[in-house]
Image (cartoon, rainbow, N blue to C red):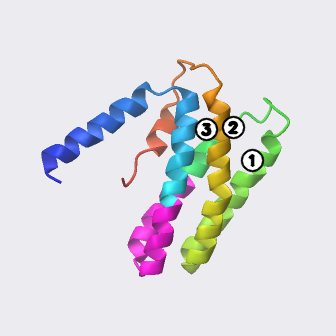
Amino acid sequence: MTYALQNRRARFISDGVAAASPQTLLVLLADRLVLDLGRAEAAQRAGDREKANTQLQHAQAIVAELDAALDRDAWDGAAGLASLYRYLQRELVTSNLTRDADLTARLREVVEPLADAWREAVSGVPSVSTTVPSMRSALGGTA
């Protein structure tokens, strides 16, 4: 891919994220988390420590943003979701330190249904024009 094409692609993605509603950002973050975990697992299995580290650190940043954005007073299930985010953070660090591709795969299996649930929940919610800059920045990272 040429440099000019890469720049146009990056701008297109950036513009799309900038215009996204908070609900859409939530789904994008969850989907990106699944993608990061899949890439990290593949890199771990291939012995590419640097790529696996990059993907797992980006996954940790996404989980941190999801946790920070969670309104713990908004609904009864928020405490359970916060607990899940803490678990994911701990296990992402463990997976990175131990280079455990099987653990990374299990984490992806935990996150995939969560991403599906967010996608389903958001599909019925009207768009809100509130901006969430920190969540937008978490979508960055390696493509």
Q: In terms of depth relative to the viewer, which is nearer, 56 or 119?
A: 119
Q: Is residue 9 left or right of residue 98?
A: left
At mark 1, the secondary structure is: helix
* Circles 2, 1 touching at the beta carbon (< 8 Å): yes
Q: CA distance from mark 2 to mark 3?
A: 16 Å
Query: What span is in magenta?
Result: 37-61
Say what amino acid the circle numbered 1 marks.
Answer: Ala
Circles 3 and 1 in contact, beta carbons < 8 Å: no
Badge 3 marks a residue whose secondary structure is helix
Q: Of circles 2 and 3, which is in front?
A: 3
Position of residue 22 measured from the top left corner of the image (x, y, whole percent):
56, 29
Position of 36 with respect to 143 (left or right) is: right
Indicate which disc residue 82 carries.
1
Image x and y of residue 10, in percent = 28, 42
Where does label 2 land, which residue? Answer: 70
Query: Mark 3 or mark 1: which comes first in sequence?
Result: 1
Q: Which residue is identified by label 3?
A: 119
Mark 3 and mark 1: Cα distance apart in space: 18 Å
- Residue 72 lies in the magenta-colored region: no
